[in-house]
Amino acid sequence: MTVSAKSVAALAGAGLLAVLAGCGGNGESATDDAIAVTATDSACEVATTSAKAGKITFEVTNNGSQVTEFYLYGPGDRIMGEVENIAPGLTRRLIVDVRDGGDYQTACKPGMKGEGIRGDFTVTGTAAQRDDPDGGLGRAVAGYHDYVTGEIALLVPRTEEFVAAVKAGDVSRAKELFPVARTHWERVEPVAESFGDLDPRIDGREDVVEEGLEFTGYHRLEKDLWQSGLRPDSPEVADRLLADIRELARRAPNVELTPVQLANGAKELLDEVATGKITGEEDRYSHTDLWDFRANVDGSKAAVEALRPVVREREPALLDTLDTKFAELDTLLDRHRAGDGYVLYTDLSEQQVRELSAAVDALGEPASKVAEVVSR
């Protein structure tokens, strides 16, 4: 039995999405210095609208009826940190490391759409770089930066090949290249998301139209290739996608990362799996979601791997748990391989979807603790 759109809705109604949204669980107790955030369908109440530069912790409780997410934005809408997939009734923690004082914004996004319910947030003073006597945190950031650089170096030519096939009208070849190019994008998406203007243009799903944005990028071309057929403006959309990818490659070397951002990125990628890949919503026309699923897990694992020496020293039991849960998820994914890729999402049974979702949930819980470990 394959999973249809109706089946996905039934799974969601049965509580699957709520379980996935709880990665990190409802048991994340507030810390003494945490800033309480109460999110509803129409409000985003932040207990205080200012904090000193350095480690800032938000405890976000969703009292609304929709799944929500919470963001801290910096100048130019740069995403300083985010926590996604907060189901009704759950509390999730976001830890961010903000070095510079200035004007920031908080945002809750009921339904995980749109610009969100925003509020001004002020960071005062400046924070010195944290003590790193053995250089472990510095090496972690440098190592992960090298990983991102390598992935983007592959993303550009793979996207060039995909765009060339689209513009040549070679639908078969473009379909083959679509999940290959996206693999490199999905591995480093948290870094790409720090450039708020690029992410929706490159990777926005059709829902962005409801938010007043133009539907462009990979998913617009995905729809052209698998559903509507190539359109007169498909070559133009392809050229814009490539220009945006090249812009990402230009900006990425200058992005400043912190160990906490690496840890948050590892969790964000698992949230990406939970909110889009495991539901079949991400690649809704091509059904190549498992390619993206694999890439998100790869990217999450790379961030944890970069932080491995630090986590091993400070919380070895957590690292053992992460290794075990990553291995279990890898084993499950490998069962769905087909040639150099994966079976279509629509080929999965409901039971197989449940198994994958349970493995993501089991990994998400320990992954949510890494940021706290590295920020000590």
Image: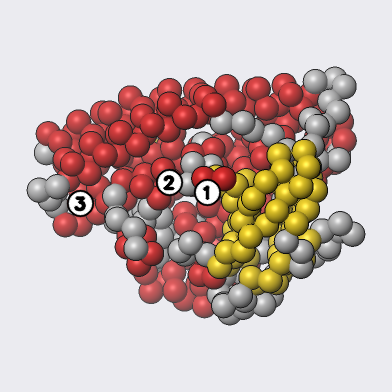
Q: Is residue 231 left or right of residue 69?
A: left
Res. 197 mark: 2
The answer to whether the residue labelled 2 contacts the one labelled 3, judged by CB atoms less than 8 Å apart, is no
Q: Amino acid at mark 2?
A: Asp
Q: Amino acid at mark 3?
A: Asp
| Residue to which mark 1 is pinned | 77
- Report the Cα–Cα distance between label 1 and label 3: 30 Å
Q: How many marks?
A: 3
Using a 10 Å C-alpha cutoff, classify the residue at mark 2 as few (fewer than 14 neighbours), some (14 to 19) or many (20 or more). Answer: some
Quadrant of image for the N terminus: bottom left
- Report the Cα–Cα distance between label 2 and label 1: 8 Å
State the image coordinates of residue 235 (x, y, percent, origin top left). 16, 40
The picture quadrant where one finds residue 129 is: top right
Q: Is residue 222 left or right of residue 235?
A: right
Q: Is residue 79 left or right of residue 178?
A: right
Quadrant of image for the C terminus: top right
| Residue to which mark 3 is pinned | 224
Against 177, is 348 above or below?
below
- Report the Cα–Cα distance between label 2 and label 3: 23 Å
User: Which mark sits nearer the N-terminus, 2 or 3?
Assistant: 2
Q: Residue at x 52, y 24 (%)?
A: 253
State the image coordinates of residue 66 (x, y, percent, origin top left). 55, 75
Q: Residue at x 68, y 71 (%)?
A: 45
On the question of residue 165 being in view, the answer is: yes
Label 2: state its secondary structure.
Answer: loop
The answer to whether the residue labelled 2 contacts the one labelled 1, judged by CB atoms less than 8 Å apart, is yes
User: Which mark sits nearer the N-terminus, 2 or 1?
Assistant: 1
User: Which mark sits nearer the N-terminus, 1 or 3?
Assistant: 1
State the image coordinates of residue 250 (x, y, percent, origin top left). 43, 26
Label 3: state its secondary structure.
Answer: helix
Q: Amino acid at mark 1?
A: Asp
